[in-house]
Image: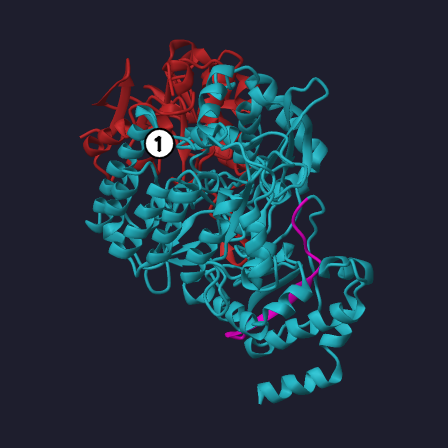
Chain colours: A red, B cyan
Amino acid sequence: MSNLIKLNNNVASIVDNEWAVVKLPASQVEARKQAGKVVLFKLTGEKTVSDEQLTNTVIPDTGKVLIPLSVFIARKTELQTRINQGDIGVWLDTHEVLAELVEHQADLNQLPIIAVHVERFADGRIFSLGVLLRTRYGYKNELRAFGDVLRDQLFFLKRSGFDSYLIRADRNAEEALLSLKDFSSPYQGAVDEARPAFVRYNRVT
Amino acid sequence: MYKYDEIDQQIVNERVTQYRDQTRRYLAGELSEEEFRPLRLQNGLYIQRHAPMLRIAVPYGMLSSKQLHKLADIAQRYDRSYGHFSTRQNMQLNWPKLEEVPDILAELATVEMHAIQTSGNCIRNITTDQFAGIAPDEVVDPRAMAEVIRQWSTFHPEFALLPRKFKIAVSGTKDDRAVVQMHDVGMEFYLDSNQKVAIKVWVGGGLGRTPILGTVIREHLEWQHALTYCEAIIRVYNLHGRRDNAYKARIKILVKALGIDAFRSQVEAEWAHLKDAPNTISQTELARVSKHFEAMPYATLPASDASFDAAVANNPAFAAWVKRSLHAHKTPGYRAVTLSLKPHGKAPGDATSEQMHVVADLAEQYSFGELRVSHEQNLILADVKLSDLFAVWEKARAHGLATPNIGLLTDIICCPGGDFCSLANAKSIPIAEAIQMQFDNLDYLHDIGDIELNISGCMNACGHHHIGHIGILGVDKDGSEWYQVSIGGSQGNNSSIGNVIGPSFSADEMPSVVQKLIDVYIKERTPEEQFIDTVRRLGVAPFKAYVYAKNTQNTKDEVAA
């Protein structure tokens, strides 16, 4: 059964996943350490993909595929026809920089889907990426979170502009649906509802 | 003070439901330890040495009598009948049961309270001056803005999982009492040349492992933009703050690494997009919230009161308390009263359920049913008539709440330390108690005069040791507890970070080390100098020389043997 939740007109339901994620081939880089601990979060803007990985990434010939941002940038020419057909989406990691995507794909809405991969659920950069895609870059199509996506972050993801959530495979998406309704009337304006409570309501003393 | 409407109440109620389910899933094994951790932390729940610790939010330090009664009842029912008031103006329970926390939250919700974002990597409780609204030197009452910021920061979706904790303080006085320079963001409200409320914004201050005072990022910000400007700052931080090393993850490290100018231009570039967005505060909203902080219905009173003057003249004990415990008030005939939670030989900042009920009753009877928590870990009745002070003193004294030591050496700021906290390297409460007993002589304390002694049990600096005139930091050396001493730190407009005087000491040595520092001060001071002034004039050297003099070493050897 699918573990993909999608919002449609603010109604959430579990739907089939028609997008295959293209992964980068594994790299040889050893785990980095800081203060004696293995570093769990990559620095924003850190270059983590080698030229070899870019060349060796296997892109299926057909079907709807999500391409890693670095591969998309490096091999855009060979993908152009399929981009025009709407068969190509882009995914990026939380440490990657949106400006690079925009630089190479001026019209983001030519992409039917953008996905952000969150390696660890505690990495809150994903929220700012969602907000920027929606409010700064005017992206209107499907915005998906995948990776370490758990129900207790769903409400924040929704408010940050994500409308598609691939719940981690070992968790129950049916139960996760409930967390989208954790709060019925939040205080601050955000992507899903730009007006703060003090604008939405006549809050009298 | 602020009263909830339906929207506020609904959010707090829904939080209880949400957290109850999260706890259920954790106990059922559906959430791993690692997954539950940020969830419980963002609800103030730490797993500690003996038991979990629950930190309850007291937004900008304001409490009603009803709320304090409830805290007293909760401490009695779910804990060991006492609570600890913290340097972030919150209250902590040291012995709650993890599975009972949802019930505690449900109780808190009935009196418009919660534990939201009292810990974790998110925007924490907003703090301010404990004399906000009543201090004669106040230019702008910052409490309405503090409440507006509280609401905005509550479950802010974009900033739910920051690289590290994020603390905001606001103040509106000439004399800063909110320590805005040691916060991730400090906001100083003032009236600009057009008599409009404006904000001077500081960024990148903080204590902890790397103590740094904040830098001004913007001299003049119109109040309407407080939230969007914070969003710009925190967005830059969220995206670029270091997540690779928890010790370098605070915004202060990012600001230092980029330099304030580069950081400022990133923030301003971000703000260019956010300025005038819907989160811009409307006049209507500020007016609505400000209504909750209007002046109390004060009586018209003369500036002095004969019965009060007579009591001061006739009762030396009352006079000593008056001298230390009162703060000037905007309104003639009124004073703010600080009730000391620092009786000698007890854990600083602790109050029993019985004491909480007493203070709540005093507030009800004499101070319009409200009180405040100070970051110095005392309780304040902000609006007491001169003619009522004697009655307040008598009742407070009968319950151990009138030690006349406010601002004196034994008014120690102190974290829970190694007795409770699993982060601590060393105990802090027994050190505080030992120093209090060393100086358990009120005449002598008054002679020493104004001084701030702050103790933290580890470099996370919850006891603000860097900005104590005397700062004590617990350190771990080869598995045993030692104490590093610094002098010359200070809060307020002339904030400074103290200098370490030398190698650390054992717990047993600490009372005599503090004694020696005081001896040097007494010997060297000019008539008008406070301890901090003497330290600033002479530097560390004479203090260091005396503390580490040969006979001191002998004492140390004897103690060690």
Q: Residue B302: give x, y in percent of width and height.
A: 58, 37
State yes or no: residue B183 in magenta: no
Query: Visible in this render: residue B108?
Result: yes
In this rendered view, identify the residue nearer to me: B270 or A78.
Answer: B270
In this rendered view, identify the residue nearer to me: A50 or B444.
Answer: B444
Q: Residue at x 49, y 53 (%)?
A: B390
In this rendered view, identify the residue nearer to me: B405 or A202.
Answer: B405
Q: Is residue B434 above or below residue B207?
A: below
The amino acid at mark 1 is Phe
Q: Is residue A114 above or below residue B544?
A: above
Q: Would residue A98 be found to the left or right of residue B556 on screen?
A: left
Q: Residue B380: give x, y in percent of width and height.
A: 49, 47
Q: Which image quarter: residue B232?
A: top right
Q: Secondary structure beneath disc 1?
A: strand
Q: Dot 1: within a 10 Å radius of its alpha carbon, few (fewer than 14), some, or many (20 or more) residues?
A: many
Q: Quadrant of the C terminus of chain A?
A: top left
Q: Would residue B556 be found to the left or right of residue B106 on screen?
A: right
Q: Residue B363: give x, y in percent of width and height.
A: 41, 44
In this rendered view, identify the residue nearer to me: A16 or B231.
Answer: B231
State yes or no: residue B478 in magenta: yes
Q: Residue at x 66, y 74 (%)?
A: B515
Q: Residue B59: give x, y in percent of width and height.
A: 44, 39
Which residue is label 1 attached to?
Answer: A146
Q: Would residue B125 be found to the left or right of residue B223 on screen?
A: left
Q: Residue at x 47, y 47 (%)?
A: B388
Query: Visible in this render: residue A58?
Result: no
Q: Is residue A93 above or below residue B91?
A: above
Chain name for mark 1 = A
Q: Magenta residues, as a range?
A: B476-492
Q: Quadrant of the N terminus of chain A?
A: top left
